[in-house]
Structures are given as structure tokens and as C-alpha cells.
Image (spheres, helix red, strand yellow):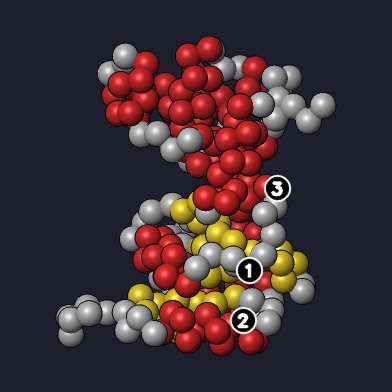
Amino acid sequence: MTEEETPTRVMLVDDHEVVRQGLKALVESTGEMEVVAQAGTVAEAVLRARSYHPDVIVMDVRLPDGSGVEACRDIRAEDPTARVLMLTSFSDDKALFDSIMAGAAGYVLKQIRGHDLLDGIRRVAAGESLLDPAVTAQVLERIRNPRSGDPRLARLTPTERRILDQIAVGSTNRQIGDELGLAEKTIKNYVSTILSKLQVVRRAEAAAYLVAHRDDS
């Protein structure tokens, strides 16, 4: 890191101090990141995010006074630019979908290797989204088995459903256009219609809506 570059400011949220200290040592070992705040509860996380405005918040999903998903939602309600990376010991697909809907930028398991977690923080800080490969299979399974009776999904035309399927696996408008033989501008118009029909604002929310409304029967 050059003198002109400022370190990535990170906040750690976990109810175990030992875990936080371990993460702090890992994060600061890079020389390009600094831990500016720590919290152990939802309430502390919201207050300290408001005070410190970190670049990235590494957030445990399970906290003693609620869920990290709730903290993510509350923090982003006050600051929509907040970048939250959810960190959990459990491969919980519901928590994953709830995190996406709450606006989290990424979701990884605590079993992740240290250098991969650091790379994830860098990617989230750079504006990318991140999904742990360990939960990708669950996401794809729910994408392939949506709940056909859902009223919002039922509003979509076959073409819109195909486009939504592609959005859910992370395809860009250009990639979707190439796949369907349609212009990128046409896909953009389709995406706007899909978001409207599903009553969501962002592509990630549309993807989460699809995978969360599979047929459980």
C-alpha cells in the first residue's frame, strides 16, 4: 500500500471476543486493512456502524439479541452504501436468502480459509458481491425447483422466467442477451419489467425471491 492509499476500514461483529480478536489479527496482518470498530450484539453493531462508517462490516449471522440479518437491514436502512459480509458457522439457506434480501454484499462460512476471507473483504470493499461456493449448490437447487404456484412468479412470461433464472445465477444483461439471442437493451427492459412484477428494486432481491419461493412439497 502506498502512502497515498488509505486502508480499508473494517468493522467486526461477533458475540465471541476471541473470534473477533482472531479476525482482527488476520485482517490487520495485511497492512492494507484496519479494524476500526467491533461489536458483539445487534444494538452495538447498529450504533458503531453509525459512528464509524466502516468500508466493510464482517457480520456474524447469529447474535445474542437477534440476527445479523436484522443488523444488516437496520444498518443499510440508515446507510444504503454500507457493505456487509455475512459470516456464519452454518450452511443455512434461509439465512442466506434473508441476507440477500437485507442487502448483504456477501455470505461466507466460517470454515473459509483466511486468505479467501481477506480476498472476500477486498472484493466486497470494491463493490462486488460474494457467495461462498459451499452454499452455491443449495442456491442452484432452489433455482431449479421454484414454487410454481407463487402469485408473483406466475405473473412472469416464459421469457421473463428464463431471464430471471439467468439473473439468479449471476449472468449479466449481455450474457443473457447472448444466451437468448436478444439485444442487451432489450434484456435491460425485460429486467425492469421483472423487478416491477416481483415488487423488488434490485436484481439480487429478484434472485433471492426466486430461490426463496420454491415448491417445498
Q: CA distance from mark 2 to mark 3?
A: 24 Å
Q: Residue furthest right?
A: 217
| Residue type, mark 1 in image | Asp
Above or below, 112 against 195 in this view is: below
| Residue type, mark 2 in image | Val
Q: Is residue 94 visible?
A: yes
Please tell me whether mark 2 or mark 3 is closer to you in this view: 2
Residue topped by disc 1? 60
Q: Position of residue 159 (x, y in %)?
A: 48, 14
Residue, x 44% and y 52% (percent of image)?
129
Q: Are marks 2 and 3 in contact (CB under 8 Å)?
A: no
Q: Which mark is residue 29?
A: none
93 or 150, nearer to the observer:
93
Above or below, 37 against 55 in this view is: below
Q: Is residue 209 visible?
A: no
Q: Is residue 59 left or right of residue 1?
A: right
116 or 52, nearer to the observer:
116
At mark 1, the secondary structure is strand
Categorize mark 2 by other alpha carbons within 10 Å: few (<14), some (14-19), many (20+): few
Residue, x 59% and y 66% (percent of image)?
111
Q: Position of residue 134 (x, y in %)?
A: 57, 51
164 or 47, nearer to the observer:
164
Q: Position of residue 110 (x, y in %)?
A: 60, 67
* Mark 1 or mark 2, earlier in chain: 2
Q: Is residue 188 left or right of residue 139?
A: left
Categorize mark 1 by other alpha carbons within 10 Å: few (<14), some (14-19), many (20+): many
Q: Position of residue 16 (x, y in %)?
A: 68, 82
Q: Are marks 1 and 2 in contact (CB under 8 Å)?
A: yes
Residue topped by disc 2? 19
110 or 99, nearer to the observer:
110
Above or below, 143 against 43 in this view is: above
Q: Which mark is residue 94?
A: 3
